[in-house]
Amino acid sequence: GQDLGQSASEVLDAMKIYANANETATSITQKAKSTVMLSNASGQDTATSANQIQAVANQFKDMKGKEDEIVNTYESISSKLAIDFGQGITDMADAVERGGSLADQAGMSFERFAAMTGTVAEKTRLSGETIGTAFKTMFARISRSKSAADEDVTAEDMSDASKAYAQLGIQIYNADGSMQDISTTLDQLSAKWSTLTDAQKAYIAEQSAGVRGISVFEA
């Protein structure tokens, strides 16, 4: 483990976290090394880092078994943010823990969601938990994903968001009636954003994110 700047004791501590799980020795060693890498980068303890990696794997279906990729994504994004490196990782991880499963359901990749939450953390200085909760509400309203939606998000909220986007010529449904990936919807909105009036921007922000999530949406 020394080649990664990790002490043997750090790796052993991390291995203990996974030892009780139904894992192979190779898998335990790999997860432990990734956990210590994230812990060293963020300044958090190994147990917290292990939970953060596991949260991504649990919430984004295509990230299972990709611990190194998860750590590299967090480190790469945080290195580009104008906030403390460790804090950037922590904020993204906290946001993913809150809103990751709904982002995945709405068709957004882990990398894009992490980048979005990191950008919002940089611009607003809000906590990762606050950012993740705001995105969770936003995805529920725009993508109409009821299964993991906040109890705060009603069918009426979802309908209002859908109508608001339709007024801009953005259809959030595909031709077959299925939901369009949230990334595509947001890209289409981004392309039109500079042409909207302030009133239109305020309206779409409130319909997308609710009153409490406007600052995150506008970031």
Image (cartoon, rainbow, N blue to C red):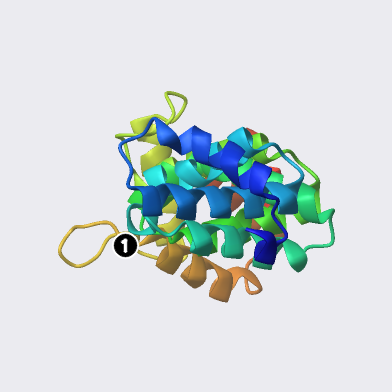
Residue 217 falls left or right of residue 143: right
What residue is shown at x 73% (from left), y 38% (from top)?
127
Q: How many marks?
A: 1
In-front residue for pair 63/2: 2
What residue is shown at x 58% (from left), y 41% (from top)?
12
Taking the image as drawn, is residue 216 in sight? no
Indicate the secondary structure of the residue bearing disc 1: loop
The residue where tag 1 is placed is 180
The picture places residue 26, in percent across and down from the top left corner, at: 38, 54
The picture places residue 91, in percent across and down from the top left corner, at: 69, 45
Q: Is residue 192 above or below residue 141?
A: below
The quarter in which the N terminus is drawn is bottom right
Disc 1 residue type (three-letter) = Gln
The picture places residue 50, in percent across and down from the top left corner, at: 54, 40
In-front residue for pair 91/138: 91
The quarter in which the C terminus is drawn is bottom right
Q: Quadrant of residue 95?
A: top right
Mark 1 Cα shell of 10 Å, populated few (<14), some (14-19), many (≥20): some
Q: Is residue 60 above or below residue 169?
A: above
Residue farthest along the left direction in this orientation: 176
Residue 170 falls left or right of residue 190: left
What residue is shown at x 59% (from left), y 65% (from top)?
72
Taking the image as drawn, is residue 181 in sight? yes
Q: Quadrant of residue 179?
A: bottom left
What residue is shown at x 51% (from left), y 34% (from top)?
16
Q: Is residue 56 above or below residue 184?
A: above
In-front residue for pair 22/195: 22
